[in-house]
Image (cartoon, helix red, strand yellow):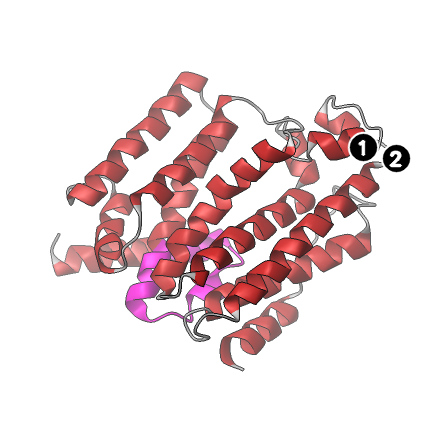
Amino acid sequence: MTDMAADQLQSAIAAKVQASGTSFYSAMRLLPVERRNAMYAIYAFCREVDDIADEGGSLEEKRAGLEDWRGEIERVFAGNPTKPVARALVGPTRDFNLRKQDFLAVIDGMAMDAEQAIVAPDLATLDLYCDRVASAVGHLSVRAFGCKEPEADDVAHHLGRALQLTNILRDLAEDADRGRLYLPKELLEQHGIPCSAPRTVLQHPKLKKVCRDVAILALDHFTKARAAMDRCAKQPMRPAAIMGAVYRAILQRLVKADWRHLDQPVKLPKWQKLWLAFRYGFL
């Protein structure tokens, strides 16, 4: 790729990331340009494989699309990918020692969604899912951030799970519309909720108790992630600190709302996002 073509590709990917409205955008913006572009490319990769799992199409088409991306990751590490986003990953993979196993884990996580609608997985399966779709992204991210300490992978492990569990608690209604329910089987049974159709589960009077228990799991992961961050250099960890603070604030709002109106989105006001970005990005 010529320098001009590479610049055009990076600009196009950055524009897509900004347009996505992701809560992570402000955290990415704090990074030096090469590391920022690495994060944009990682995020774009995640969106591409997530779209394969979530959008319409037959199971065979979804399998083929994800398998195509497995081959593309192999080509990234060989230095000859064909997809635009994959081409943008070549430099970051080389410069920041991104691991092939983490890219493949993300694809494996999307395959779990593509193969069948996940409904009330057991805790072990839920943890594996969170590891693949979130913590694996964290392992890629901490390397792109420039974190050198072994504890950085502990941050990825716990923060990824915390973020994904928060997403699950926030998106219950949206997931149910897709025939999915990520609340764990053990907690549903513990509170006397039969594992049936997702929308039926969401109407159960004891749903709040299950959600509160999952929130406790998420909070534990947030706490462990913060402890691991404190053992790492502060500056490279700033994007992770912002992401953790924003999502922990979302979790707090969910707990306060107590899952009374599942179809009403829970979001942070812009001023609070800006304050958290300032507090954890610059102070």
In the image, what residue occupies the spot 31% across and 34% down? Answer: 69
The outermost residue toward the bottom is: 283
The outermost residue toward the left is: 2
* Disc 2 secondary structure class: loop
Residue 95 colored in magenta in the image: no
Picture quadrant where residue 67 is located: top left
Residue 19 colored in magenta in the image: yes
Residue 252 in the image, given as x and y percentages of width and height: 73, 59
Q: Which mark is residue 59?
A: none
Q: Which residue is mark 1?
A: 190
Question: Observer-nearest residue: 20 or 191?
Answer: 191
**Can residue 67 be seen in this snapshot?**
yes
Q: Quadrant of the C terminus?
A: bottom right
**Can residue 267 be seen in this snapshot?**
no
Residue 26 in the image, given as x and y percentages of width and height: 48, 66
* Disc 1 secondary structure class: helix
Picture quadrant where residue 123 is located: top right
State if disc 2 and disc 1 touch (CB < 8 Å).
Answer: no
Q: Which residue is mark 2?
A: 205
Name which of mark 1 and mark 2 comes first in the sequence: 1
In the image, what residue occupies the spot 78% across and 28% down? Answer: 189
Total number of numbered discs in the rendering: 2
Please indicate whether residue 99 sits to the left or right of residue 24 in the image.
Answer: left
Residue 234 in the image, given as x and y percentages of width and height: 46, 75
C-alpha distance separating marks 1 and 2:
14 Å
Please indicate whether residue 253 sits to the left or right of residue 111 in the image.
Answer: right
Q: Main secondary structure of the magenta part?
A: helix
- What segment carries the magenta color? 15-40
Q: Is residue 281 above or below residue 192?
A: below
